[in-house]
């Protein structure tokens, strides 16, 4: 088994509980990888521009409280 199509077909043949187990296993790994990448990006300054823009928007009172957005949606 070497292609994603073959792997996908094999997974579909598994019982539902094993499919769910794989889903959770991979989801947990993907979220952990995502967290690691975000931490690296923050440490490397890749998000500084966005943080500075957000701070400027807050300072200029160009923001809407989240509860107002939720309430009005």
Image (cartoon, rainbow, N blue to C red):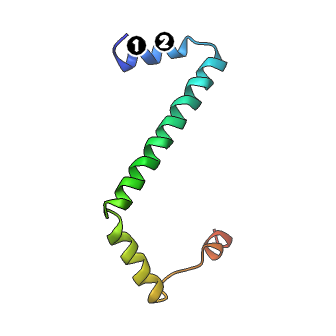
In the image, is 20 to the left or to the right of 52? Answer: right
The residue nearer to you, when weighing 46 against 17, is 46
In the image, what residue occupies the spot 37% across and 77% down? 53
Tell me where residue 14 appears, x and y as whole percent: 58, 12
Badge number at residue 73: none
Badge number at residue 10: 2
- Would you identify the image quadrant in which residue 21 lies? top right
- Would you identify the image quadrant in which residue 39 lies? bottom left
Tell me where residue 70 appears, x and y as whole percent: 64, 69
Which residue corresponds to mark 1?
6
| 26 shown above or below 35 | above
In the image, what residue occupies the spot 40% across and 72% down? 51
Alpha carbon separation for disc pair 2 and 1:
6 Å
In the image, what residue occupies the spot 47% across and 38% down? 30
Tell me where residue 1 appears, x and y as whole percent: 38, 10
- Would you identify the image quadrant in which residue 22 lies? top right
Crowding near the residue tagged with mark 1, few <14, some 14–19, many ≥20 C-alpha atoms within 10 Å: few
In the image, is 8 to the left or to the right of 24? Answer: left
Determine whether label 2 and label 1 are within 8 Å by CB.
yes
């Amino acid at each position: 088994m070497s292609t994603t199509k073959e792997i996908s077909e094999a997974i579909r043949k598994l019982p539902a509980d094993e499919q769910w187990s794989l889903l959770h296993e991979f989801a947990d790994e993907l979220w952990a990888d995502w967290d690691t990448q975000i931490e690296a990006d923050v440490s490397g300054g890749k998000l500084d521009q966005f943080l500075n823009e957000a701070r400027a928007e807050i300072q200029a009172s160009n923001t809407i409280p989240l509860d107002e957005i939720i309430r009005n949606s």
